Image: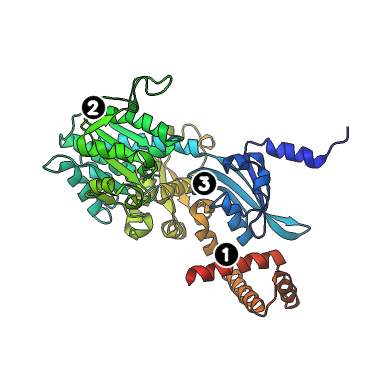
Amino acid sequence: MQIDKTELYTIILDNLPEGVNVVNAEGYLVYANKTSAKYACASSPAEMIGKHITQYYSRAALLEVISTQKSMRDVKITHANGRTFITNAFPVYFHETFFGGVATFRDITEIEELSNRLESLEIELILSQVSDIFDVFIGKSYSLRGVIDKAQRSIAAIGGPRHSIILGETGTGKTMLAKAMYYFAKKIKVIKPDAPFIEVNCAQFINSDIAAMEVFGTEKGAYTGSIDKPGLVELADKGVLFLDEAHTLVQHQTMLLKLIESGMSRRVGGRTERELDLIIIAASSKDLKKEFLPELYQRLAQYQIDIPPLRDRSNEERESLLNLFVSQYMLRAKERNSIELQVSFTGQAKEIILGAKYERNIRQFRDVVFASIDAAAPLVGSLPEDDKEVIRVLVQAIHIPMTMVESNLWQQQSTKVDRDIDDIIDAKIISLHKTGLGPRKIAAELQKQGYHIEYYRVAYKLTKLKKESVSSN
Ligand SMILES: Nc1ncnc2c1ncn2[C@@H]1O[C@H](COP(=O)(O)OP(=O)(O)OP(=O)(O)O)[C@@H](O)[C@H]1O
């Protein structure tokens, strides 16, 4: 049988559990497999070909790859649609000429969800063990002073506890704060010791009708096959309802408003109303003033608590966070493997970790600290079993996973010479373009001057430079 190799490769690539994308040097898709189309909610790979990668993957690693021509390994990226992928991306050379990039990626949104749940349980464990609940917050007396003051006031108000909004970027500590408010409410006896804390990630529901049924419950006969089912609001009665990613509630804000205004709730399809007494804490990474109905926002805004991102916190606070996560790591090593670790950092490693940008804030900072110690520490099986010695671990710059600290660090790492040459080429491209030359002619002209740069890289640079000049105007 004659085998058509192209067809065979297409079948193989389409059946991979990972998504695969290939782009040219300008970021336009020249190939996408079926998994990628499924992840991107495209009707088929064919629909995607010829379109710019950002149309489907807002923060594609390939953009970085075609700009730096460097590989990226195991980068965690969350796109605008909220899905998170682990991505590997590499530059592609065709007949020794830079062509573009290829990326393979796997959807880890559900795994992330699970690990967030675990993290949530860990926070609970810590909070349930301390006597002064807010002491566990690094920054309690500095960047979070106002935050903690407002959180306490909302719970301890003389007229009774208030509902509130917590706003902040991902990983800034919204869940931790909501849980602390719940433990605080128990401590000052605003709620009973066995009061519930019900956490709902409003973004997890496939559509808003399902969200409404889960949050407000259903009554038998509401629709074919419906049953009597209490909503999460009922389960949170006499306790705290934590609505995470509350901006995704969209269509059911009136039901929430009614509950907040009158303390009454009605199940979907129900006729009777139930009186509920609960504290609602709505959290979001979006500005709820723009997302919520004005009446709903007004009701909650009296206690709007804004948590600052990590980049707005001082170096001292970052250092305290670093110490906290190092002690957590050492404690785990002791509890799990009975290993006594002593972790320290070289000056350079510390400088890089403290100075990097963390889009996912404290969570990412913690992950980077843990991964760096992982890379510097010996593996469990490599130590003699009866070793009772303290193991000293020195974290150096080489142990820091550069792909986890986002692109800013690679840029810092690229040599000054590289950057100077890039600047010279950019300037030359602009001046040649001003004389009316297109990408091919510019590339030929640069070749004559001793700078080898492919025409599609010139085209990409021109688009990038144009974009930069538009955004700076
Ligand atoms: N001030 C702080 N001090 C110590 N640890 C903190 C602080 N703020 C956050 N953390 C830790 O950072 C991690 C992320 O916090 P948390 O889950 O509360 O963030 P979040 O804003 O709810 O994130 P998301 O929006 O993604 O749900 C947790 O492990 C938490 O314990």
Residue 218: image quadrant is top left
Instruction: Say what secondary structure mark 1 lies in.
Output: loop
Work out which quarter of the rendered image holds the N terminus and state it. top right
Mark yes or no: residue 301 visible.
yes
Mark-to-mark CA distance, 1 and 3 = 22 Å
Residue, disc 3: 375
Front one among 173 and 154: 154
Tell how many labels. 3
User: Residue 230 location, x and y as percent?
Assistant: 32, 24
What residue is at 34 percent from the left and 32 percent from the top? 215
- Above or below, 196 against 55 in this view is above
- Above or below, 402 against 443 in this view is above
Instruction: Say what secondary structure mark 2 lies in.
Output: strand
Q: Quadrant of ligand 1?
A: top left
Residue 18: image quadrant is top right
Residue, disc 2: 274
Pointer 3 or 2: first along the chain: 2
**In the drawing, does residue 238 fall left or right of residue 220?**
left
Q: Residues within 10 Å of mark 2 (few under 14, many from 20)?
A: few
User: Residue 126 location, x and y as percent?
Assistant: 30, 37
Residue, disc 1: 414
**In the drawing, does residue 211 fall left or right of residue 452?**
left
Mark yes or no: residue 135 visible.
no
The amino acid pointed to by label 1 is: Ser
Q: Residues within 10 Å of mark 3 (few under 14, many from 20)?
A: some
User: Residue 311 location, x and y as percent?
Assistant: 38, 58
Front one among 194 and 43: 43
The amino acid pointed to by label 3 is: Ala
